[in-house]
Image (tube, rainbow, N blue to C red):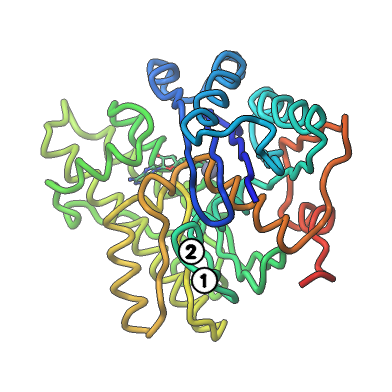
Amino acid sequence: MNILGIESSCDETAIAILADNEVLSHSIHTQIPLHQKWGGVVPELASRDHAVRMLPLIQKTLSEAKLDLTKIDAFAYTAGPGLIGSLLMGATAACTLAANYQKPIYPIHHLEGHLFSALIDNAEQFPAIVLLVSGGHSMFIVAHAPGNYQVVGQSVDDAVGECFDKVAKLMGLGYPGGPIIEKMAKNGNAKRWSLPRPMLHSANCNMSFSGLKTAVMQTWQKLDQPSEQDKADMAASFQQAVSDVLLKKMKLVCKSYAIDTVLLVGGVAANNFIRAEQSAMLTELNKRLLCPKHELCTDNGIMIAKSGMMRAKYATKSLGPGEIFVRPRWQLSDYLADWWDLRTI
Ligand code: KG4
Ligand code: ZN
């Protein structure tokens, strides 16, 4: 079965074609240079760019897979959550093509896409504890089975990736902040500043990062003309504080749920320091950690095509011909209730 997946929820236009478990081709156009000078994503610029890139990128991906549209058996696209204009560009392309070729179409929840990204190069693993850390979300999920997810903890304020981005911005380092901070932190002293680890000792699996960000800002503003070493030390101190919170909360989730497999997904999962710290701790607990390849941690089309493949396998519900569906704000629980038919599992 060939599935074409489209991701356009934020600042990446990404297309992929999967043949069962094999990636035939995938393409990604990142808008990072477009938004860089504004220090963050400008929604109107994002949707305009998706509109321009979408069809040429679909053509390119098809030709690299040596297929034409008649050979695509189903379509999948990110229907939410995300920026409305950006989502509509992917939805319009996917729904029009599906209607034209009379093929099933699966609207996908972006977070489920990230969850399944860990299974692109690994066999299906359920149940699994999932730590999903991206620019918009930070949560612990217990994935009991495909389409059966329980959110057991989440950030009560900023997402981890958002915090990396904001800290980088206030230090004048550029966008997106995660990879820049990770690189700077390599030469830094993580013990130079003792930054807060909010909610570290609370008994639940929720997290908070906005106080950490504020503490970085207050410490940073006291420095007169920060040097390169100051920047490296702050990057390292901040990254260590984030990692400590994620470690402590992961331990708590592992204690609460007797599950052997852990998936670390989302853009922040590309961070080697956070990966290594989680991996060392989970090895001690005899858990198996699965992470996507680095390039599959950040938004991509393969994870959406993979989700479409899982929907085609386990749940039959798809959009009707001529229908179009997006949800800029979308609870995972509403997605599951509306689009997964658990009776088939
Ligand atoms: O999953 P993603 O591509 O988009 C969302 O769904 O939000 O994640 C993007 C986020 C950004 O905040 C970016 O700074 C962060 O992931 N990120 C990183 C790294 N690479 C990307 N954060 C920390 N370390 C990294 N190496
Ligand atoms: Zn994402």
Query: Residue 92 appears in which quarter of the rendering?
Result: top right
The one nearer the camera, 149 or 240, is 149
- Give the total number of marks visible in the rendering: 2
Residue 83 located left or right of residue 284: right
The one nearer the camera, 267 or 3, is 3
Q: Position of residue 160 (x, y in %)?
A: 45, 49
The one nearer the camera, 49 or 57, is 57
| Residue at (51% x, 61% y) in the render | 119
- State if disc 2 and disc 1 touch (CB < 8 Å): yes
Query: Dot 2, how many residues are within 10 Å of its Cα: few (below 14), some (14-19), or many (20+)?
Result: some
Residue 334 located left or right of residue 130: right
Query: Residue 156 appears in which quarter of the rendering?
Result: bottom right
Q: Position of residue 204 (x, y in %)?
A: 57, 72
Q: Which mark is residue 199?
A: 2
Q: CA distance from mark 1 to mark 2?
A: 5 Å
| Residue at (50% x, 53% y) in the render | 22
Q: Which mark is residue 202?
A: 1
Residue 205 located left or right of residue 248: right
Query: Dot 1, how many residues are within 10 Å of its Cα: few (below 14), some (14-19), or many (20+)?
Result: few
Residue 118 located left or right of residue 72: left
Q: Position of residue 154 (x, y in %)?
A: 58, 59
| Residue at (31% x, 54% y) in the render | 195
Give the residue type at disc 1.
Ser
Give the residue type at disc 2.
Met
Instruction: Say if residue 327 shows up in the picture.
Output: yes
Classify mark 2: helix, strand or loop. Answer: loop
Classify mark 1: helix, strand or loop. Answer: loop
